[in-house]
Amino acid sequence: MGRRYWLLLSAFLASSLGTWIYRLALPLLVYDLTGSALGTGLVYAMEYLPYVALGMLGGVLADRVDRRRLLVLGDLASAAVTVLLAVIVTAGVRQLWPIYALAFLLACVDPLYQPAFRSIVPSLVPVERLPQANARIHMGEHAVNMIGPVAGGALVVGLGHQAAIYVDAGTFLLSALLILPVRVARGVVTSRATLMGRSMLADMQEGIGFLFRGDKVVLTTALATAACNFAVWLLLAGLVYYLSSYHGFTAEEIGVVYAFQGAGAVLGAVLGSRLLRRCPPGPVICWAVVAGGLSMLAMIAARGPVLIGLAWMGQFAAAGTSIVAVATVRQLLVPDHLLGRVLGMARMVAFLSIPLASLATGVFEQEARNAYALMVAAGVGWLAIAAVMANTPLGRLRLPALRDAYGGRSAPPGECRPPDPR
């Protein structure tokens, strides 16, 4: 893969370790302060609303400026906001609005950061290695998650919520230091520099045009991901509340469930990379969504940290397989000079449903207190999505196996694409 890729991956893993500790600590903090399913769900809504407003802007920036510098600035900004959040928690502030406000500011960095991170990967590895590169990113992120949630639960119990947030700030700083030596090919930077003479509005319109009028497969991945996100976040947004309120799990037991979740994502990344070498990506994605739906239905009968964790492991294995396949399809079908904008827009569309699902979960649980009905809705929803996808351009996608797509030779990203799948 090369030194540049491994530095980028190491930076990503460093920030992922702290981020997942933070994502466990903050909902637990809000739950401790309020005991409210709606209040806990609102944390997730605050985290994902910025994707709706800033996703396309992040894509434009990724195509217009040096992606490496954008990543470093994003890490430094995240560290600054996280330190401020930790200071407020340490000061014993019990009002929720400062916590929500800083969580929102921290979340504003990610939609500006992620398009640059995702679109820099094809510049660092040969095109036939993209499935492995994407799989290792997904695998590494969730391998860390097997350790991070357990460590986060121990930190919350032993040292308090603020300790977990301080750790998160340190990982952002480490990530910035690791990204600094990464350099992309000069030709890639030069091609992006031509965009600087145009207005940002024109750049946005070009990216939107490619997504909604240029390639039906890429559009379908965005719409299908949005639908899947809505269904699964009916469970994810209330998971901490469900485990705490319905089962009385401790922070350590909740960490165990999240660790199983991470193990499933690692398994899914391995499966996704291997399946794409042998099977067309369309059926891989559809069958992965079917498996995810069945796993969420299994949550209804699961009891105890291990059985609930196993059900989530199945769901995240299925989701991981689909994520690796979708990421690879997008990187192969979108030209490099449009990649940041299209990925940013696709991510914005996909994440649009998460705040809606988070709020819906909180309201429904507050009024009906029936988490099992949400599990049925989520599981059946994924099965229905898979059935619809199978009859779209994405479901019928038959790109050649990636090991044969280029006759065994490397092709620079953006210069050589697979045959038109339609």
Image (spheres, rainbow, N blue to C red):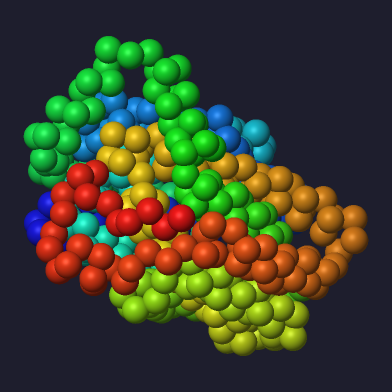
Q: Give 267 or 97, whichever is nearer the viewer.
A: 267
Q: Residue at x 71, y 51 (%)?
A: 357
Q: Is residue 256 left or right of residue 234?
A: left
Q: Residue furthest right?
A: 368
Q: Give 338 or 74, whichever is nearer the viewer.
A: 338
Q: Can residue 204 be seen? A: yes
State the image quarter where residue 372 is shown: bottom right
Q: Give 420 or 85, whichever is nearer the viewer.
A: 420
Q: How many marks?
A: 0
Instruction: Indicate the position of residue 239 as horizontal and vertical percent values.
Output: 66, 65
Q: Give 317 or 222, whichever is nearer the viewer.
A: 222
Q: Residue at x 55, y 75 (%)?
A: 287
Q: Can residue 110 be seen? A: no
Instruction: Indicate the position of residue 391 as horizontal and vertical percent values.
Output: 63, 63
**Residue 271 position (above or below residue 355):** below
**Residue 332 position (above or below residue 322):** above
Q: Residue at x 13, y 59 (%)?
A: 410
Q: Is residue 357 left or right of residue 224?
A: right
State the image quarter where residue 163 is shown: bottom left
Q: Residue at x 16, y 49 (%)?
A: 412
Q: Is residue 52 left or right of residue 321?
A: right
Instruction: Indicate the position of residue 201 as horizontal and vertical percent values.
Output: 45, 17
- Give the quadrant of the N terminus: bottom left
Q: Is residue 240 left or right of residue 109?
A: right
Instruction: Indicate the position of residue 27 as horizontal and vertical percent values.
Output: 60, 54
